[in-house]
Image (cartoon, grey):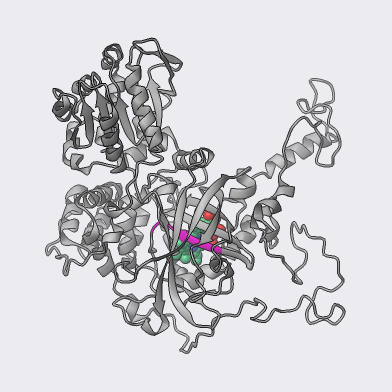
Amino acid sequence: MDKNQQLEPYRKSHGEELLTTNQGVRVSNTDDSLKAGNRGPTLMEDFHFREKLTHFDHERIPERVVHARGFGVHGYFQVYESMAEFTKAKFLQDPSVKTPVFVRFSTVVGSRGSADTVRDVRGFATKFYTEEGNYDLVGNNIPVFFIQDAIKFPDVVHAIKPEPHNEIPQASAAHDTFWDFVVNTPETAHMIMWLLSDRAIPRSYRMMEGFGVNTFRFVNQQGKARFVKFHWKPLLGVHSLVWDEAQKLAGKDPDYHRRDLWDAINMGSYPEYELGVQMIEEEEEFNFDFDILDPTKIWPEEMIPVKRIGKMTLDGNVDNFFAETEQVAFHPGHVVPGIDFSNDPLLQGRLFSYLDTQLIRLGGPNFHEIPINRPVAPIHNNQRDGYHRMTIDRSSVSYSPNSLQGNAPTPATEAEGGYVHYEEKVEGKKVRQRSESFQDHFSQATLFWNSMSTAEKQHIIEAFHFEVGSVMDQQIKQWVVDMFNNVDGQLAVQIAAGVGATPPANPKSSGSAASSPTVSQENTIKTAGTRKVAILLENGYNHQEVSQVMEALTAAGVHSEIISKNLGMLTSVDGQQLEVGKNYVTTGSIKYDALYIPGGQQSINTLVMQGEALHFINETFKHAKTIGATNEGIDLLMTSAIQGVAMAGADTQAQVITEMGVVTIRNATDMKDFAKEFIHAIAQHRHWIRQNKKQMIPA
Ligand code: HDD
């Protein structure tokens, strides 16, 4: 059965029905409680009052202990070609099969009501409703983890969550307990580098990679196994916000990422991600200078290529956030035949924790009966009863073996699709130890640092200044400097300079300077598709200019919105009209990818007098986004803080000039060349060449 069809009986529309209690009794008044006299006390016998309040009092379930804030969407997955050579998983065999999926994106640290754009790891959890049962790929947007052994998970989470005495700060790693944990736990070094990079402030869930992080196994029909790591590769590329923007968005639009996803799906711009796998033969397990079971290590893509095996399309928003997004239950232990585990000690612990957490969060062992969690594959077993059991099992037999029911339900053979665990040979003493091969905590942190562009490195340094600068304890700050000197000496020197600590006496050199270019976002897919452009406009604008540019943007899949002082209609020089989408108080430059200022003398004369318009320009420039201006629009740029850059376009004759991502044309009526260049500039995402100019821009 199709997942959508399966959900249908549970969907309920609300129209013109008469109000009832939960027992179906019609209610005559829901605004006044039953009282002894109209100024008297409420009576116990008011069953409607009691039921309504009781239900309300119990509306909340515990939020997830981590990943509390999230957003879920429906979609489907299709494999490109049969993967039978590597795995017998049925959903990876036939390119014509569309497997339904539900994906929940999340932040890790913040509470359910926290802001979307905080600096944090993003969860990327996918439930595949396959014919052989549910398979959950519970990943993150960062390919490595803080710790190597699951027994330390409560420690890292306690350290990063708000401090227990005052519950400050919300959704942030920038505080003493977290950095105290870090300096005492060198295995965190690699993930800290990713967490302080642009990866931790994504532009959109649609522009984020996903990683299974842990090492799993693929097992084929012949029983041959290979180690595998899973990847999601977004077709829009991997792109991020800048920190100032992320902080401002957290205030101005805390729902920025969920709104972006919700809107994209509603507009039909369905996010797409390719599923990639890296595979290592069992015989090659020990051929690397890192342990392939160590979750603090990547398998560099240049060394072990990512094979793209299929595509996921997200095409459906939920009907009800609580019923679907809040109640969905993921678990790395939800696997299907053909996918198996490795001895990665973090994964092994995860296999316990997720089932356990659902019991408290969803209130018992029957959470698989909640519609969003139901497999499309049929369920037959002897499990019975428990809180909130929905199924009415119709047999006296609830045990195995049995003869009363011919021993049904009968275990399936492997040929019948029974899950048979990979027969890995295991031998060893019971020890509380970690393998020597897990001891190198810095080489890949250095590899990551060496792979960053100049701009990305600068962002990491600034992130250290913010995070460690927020730590109160001077000793911890110093230890951070000392610890990251093991990654790169110059990085440590720069951290020290920003946080008032002493630079390392012997700055470490980067050694071999080995790099992995694929981890840099500079090398990602660049497209203007689905980006948002703000157009600043007032009465007396040039209609022909605006409409030509807007048409070109639409043709390239770029969305645009008109922003003005007041909502309503604007009239052009020649009497045409356009509707304002947002005014300055309901939006801001931070909500757009680019800015366009069309000409029209009267419009520009008004804009020049508006502080909000100038702030819009300055802020867009500061955040390294594309700015376009045509004809008199350039005069507005000349009155802003970026006049030095706009100067290049000031006197040109119908020729497009691009200077640091500022695209201009003067004396032109045909906007074709301008639009082409403007769209090309938007596709670059950001113009980091401005990095050293941003000081000239006021906040
Ligand atoms: Fe976890 C939730 C991802 C390590 C224990 N985790 C959770 C979610 C994601 C991840 C995406 C949210 C699922 C959803 O949207 O409902 N977690 C990871 C990744 C890890 C990782 C990629 C490292 C490879 N997690 C990890 C460890 C443990 C947990 C080591 C415990 C031993 N994670 C949990 C949890 C959560 C959870 C407490 C909270 C809510 C839930 O499971 O359903 O069990």
Magenta stretch encompasses residue 311: no
Nearer to the camera, 665 or 385: 665
Residue 65 appears in view: no
Magenta residues?
A: 136-142
| Rendered location of residue 481, percent (x, y) | 22, 58
The residue shown at (12%, 62%) is: 505
Quadrant of the rendering where the C terminus is positioned: top left
**680 to 628, vertically: above or below:** below
- Name of the residue lying farthest toward the left: 505
Residue 563 appears in view: yes
Nearer to the camera, 498 or 42: 498
The residue shown at (76%, 59%) is: 389
| Rendered location of residue 363, percent (x, y) | 67, 57
Left or right of 236? Residue 408 is right
In which quarter of the view is residue 678 placed?
A: top left
Left or right of 173? Residue 379 is right
**515 to 55, vertically: above or below:** below
Quadrant of the rendering where the N terminus is positioned: bottom right
Nearer to the camera, 598 or 454: 598
